Image (cartoon, rainbow, N blue to C red):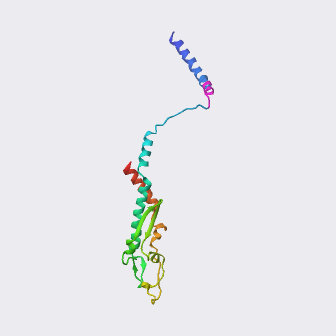
Amino acid sequence: MGAEKLLQRAQKIRKGLKPLQEKLKFRVPVAVGFRTTVDTTELENLIKKIEALDIANLLLQKLVKTVEEELTKAITTAQWDAYDGSTVDIVDTGALLDSQKVYIANNSIVVEYGVSYAGIVHFGGYIIPYQNPYAERVFLPARPWTTILTDGTIDFQGIVESELIKILKNKL
């Protein structure tokens, strides 16, 4: 076959390709199913590691430590008005501070003060000094140091987020 005949044949093939492509467009089904597989072995291993970390308990322990520190700071910071116009902390004998207990119970952080006068110091009210029946009642102003737990002073969400990042970086 000569070169000229080969050229003519190639031109015919090229001319025929376009109609063939158009025909194929309409012959391919519109909905063609397919399947792809993703190996999740590494992800499953990571999930097992995370489950083994007991993250909830680690986070609660961090929150307990933070609450203890912040409550101690609130009691020992000079922020309360004294009778002479100065500002004082509410630590006298140290018994109130020493009675502080912060612990976890039923997925909650519990704060307790074990001295009998904790409520009067926190909420304020009248007392009879030394239970002396001859003494006049004395008003003690409220010094609510535990409001830091509910007023936004402690950023619980921020603590959890940053601690979670630390845990995952260090343990995985």
Position of 93 relative to 163 (above/below)? below
The spot of residue 64 in percent (x, y) is: 42, 62
The range drawn in magenta is 23-30
| Residue at the spot 61% in from the left edge and 32% down from the top edge | 31
Kindly indicate the quadrant of the structure image that contains residue 97. Answer: bottom left
**Residue farthest to the top, as pictured:** 1
Kindly indicate the quadrant of the structure image that contains residue 22. Answer: top right
Position of 139 relative to 50 (above/below)? below
Kindly indicate the quadrant of the structure image that contains residue 121. Answer: bottom left
Position of 99 relative to 85 (above/below)? above
Question: 140 or 136: nearer the eye?
Answer: 136
Question: 22 or 81: nearer the eye?
Answer: 81
How many marks overall? 0
Question: 57 or 87: nearer the eye?
Answer: 57
| Residue at the spot 45% in from the left edge and 70% down from the top edge | 146
Question: 136 or 1: nearer the eye?
Answer: 136
The spot of residue 91 in percent (x, y) is: 38, 76
Q: Main secondary structure of the magenta part?
A: helix
The spot of residue 160 in percent (x, y) is: 44, 58
Whether residue 27 appears in magenta in the rendering, the answer is yes
| Residue at the spot 43% in from the left edge and 45% down from the top edge | 48
The spot of residue 102 in percent (x, y) is: 42, 65
Position of 62 relative to 131 (above/below)? above
Whether residue 92 appears in magenta in the rendering, the answer is no
Image-based side of 9 in relation to 136, left or right: right
